[in-house]
Image (tube, rainbow, N blue to C red):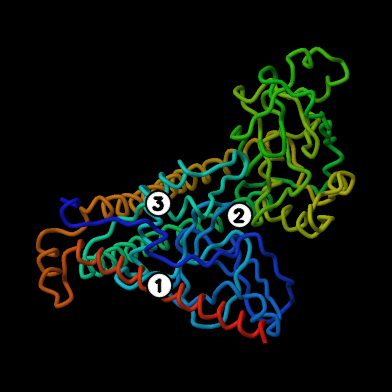
Amino acid sequence: MMKNRWCSLELGQLAKFIDYRGKTPKKTTHGIPLITAKNVRMGFIKEDPKEFIANEDYDAWMTRGIPNKRDILFTTEAPLGYVAQLKTSNKIALAQRLITFQVVEGIINEFLKFNLMSPQFQTTLDSLSTGTTVKGIKASKLKLIKIHFPPLPEQRAIVAKIEQLFSELDNGIANLKAAKAKLVIYRQAVLKKAFEGELTRNTKIEEKKIGDFAKIISGFAFKKSEYSNEGVKLFQIANVSFNKITWKKTAYLPSSYLGNPKFENLILKQGDLVMALNRPMLNNKLKIGRLSNADVPSILYQRVGKFDLLPAVLPDYLLYFLQSPLFTKWLSDELQGVNIPFINQTKLLAFKSFPYTNCENQYAIVQEIETRLSVCDNILRNIEEGLEKAEALRQSILKKTFEGKLLNETELAVCRQQPDWEPAEKLLARIRRDAMHRVSTTTTMATKTATTTTKQNDR
C-alpha cells in the first residue's frame, strides 16, 4: 500500500546540509547560546551544558550557514543519530558533531524529523556507521540514505497524528515519573525514621563512629596488561550501582590471582558490602551494594572500598543507614575534588553519628525497613515497566508510520480532498526540478563571480 502512495529520494536532495562538524569556537560565559552534540537528545534539545560564544564572533563563526526555526539538528557522532528541532527564532551558534538540515519545499520539517527518528532510519544509519568505541558517519554516506515520503497533505496528517499520540504518551510518562519521584521521597522518609528509632519500640540508640565497627579495604590498581578474556571477575567502580551490583561492564583477571597471597584481602565473598569511593553520589543516591552468590568470586579494583565489619554490626543495617539522608547529606558536603569527587576514607570512618544499637534491634529495624520498601520496590518495578512500554510504544508508532500504516482509509480520503493534494510522483518531480534550478542558479552565480574577479585582476 505504501509503495503505491509514497516515493523516495536521497536525504541530500531533500535537505540542505549545514555542517559544523570538526569546528570548536572560542567559548564565553555569556553571549549567543552555543548548541553542540552534547545538547541534542532524541527528540529534544536540553539546556545543559550552557555554553556561549561572543556576539561579535557570531558572523565570523557562522559562515557555513545560519540555522532557522524548525530546522532539524542531527548528531553525527558521540552519540550518532540523535534528532531534534529548533523551536526558537533567536540567534544560536552551532559546533562539534552537528549537521543542520534545512528542508526543501514539498517536505514538512516535522515529517523529516520523525522519519529520522524512526527505527527504519536508525537501523540503516547504524549499518552505514563506522567506528567501534565511538560510532560516526560520513556526510557523503548520510546524503545517500533514501527517505520515503507521501503527498504533502498526507505528510501534514501524519505529523498531526504523531504529535497527538506523542502528547498523550508524554502525559502518561510525566505521571509515571511524578509517581516515581514520590516513591524516592517515601523511601528516604522510611530510612530516616528507621534510624531515628521511630519504626521500632523502645530501641535504645547511641551515636558512634563508623570506624568503631568497621575498616575499609580499598582495591588495587591492576594494569590492563594483566587482564584476561576469562577467569575471575574484576570488581570495578562500574559494577556498583544504587543498592545493587551490575555486570554490564565486565573485566577479568587470570584465575591464578585467587591463590596469590598478595591479593587475599581483595577477594570478595558473598555478602560483602562494597561502596564507590570516587564519584560515590549521583542525584543524591549512593553507589553501594551487597554481593550475591552470582557476584563471586571477584577481586576488588581501585576506587571501590569493601567494609570489613565487626560482628557487632549487621551488613544490611549499615547498608540501609548509608543510603539514608542522615548519611548521604553529610557525605555530599564532605566530598573532595572537583572533576572527580571522592570521599576521604579516614573522614568516612570518623563519621560520628552512626546510630548504634544491639544486633537484635538492628535486625528488627532492617525487617521494618524491608517490609515497607518491598511494597515501594514493587510499585517502582511497575513504573519502570510502564516507562519501558511507553518508549516501545513510541518506537512502534514511528515504525508503523513509515510502513505507511498510521493513517486509516478515512483519514487518507480526507487528505485526497485537500486542494494541494497531488500524487507523490508529481511531488518528487517538482522537488527534482527545484533542485536542478538551484544547482543551475548556483553555477551561474559562481561563474559570474569568477568572471568579475578575473576582469578585476586583468586591470
Give the residue type that dot 1 points to: Ser
Callout 1: 10 Å neighbours few (<14), some, many (20+)? few
Q: Secondary structure at mark 2?
A: helix
Q: Residue 201 location, x and y as percent?
A: 63, 47
Q: Residue 420 location, x and y as percent?
A: 18, 76
Callout 3: 10 Å neighbours few (<14), some, many (20+)? some
Label 1 vs 2, first from the N-terminus? 2
Q: Can you tell which of label 1 and label 3 is closer to the viewer?
A: 1
Q: Residue 152 location, x and y as percent?
A: 23, 69
From the viewer's side, name the closer residue of 397 and 340. 397
- Which quadrant does the C terminus fall into? bottom right
Label 3 vs 2, first from the N-terminus? 3
Give the residue type that dot 2 points to: Gln
Q: Residue at x 29, y 71 (%)?
A: 106
Count of all numbered marks drawn on residues in the image: 3
From the viewer's side, name the closer residue of 296 and 188. 296
Q: Which mark is residue 145?
A: 3
Q: Taking 102 as reference, is 96 above or below it?
A: above
Label 1 vs 3, first from the N-terminus? 3
Label 3 and label 2: CA atoms lie apart by: 50 Å
Q: Quadrant of residue 76?
A: bottom right
Q: Secondary structure at mark 3?
A: loop
Q: Which mark is residue 188?
A: 2
Q: Which residue is mark 1?
A: 440
Residue lying farthest to the front in this orientation: 458
Q: Residue 195 location, x and y as percent?
A: 68, 49
Label 1 and label 2: CA atoms lie apart by: 67 Å
Q: Is residue 308 left or right of residue 50?
A: right
**Mark 3 near mark 2, Cβ–Cβ under 8 Å?**
no
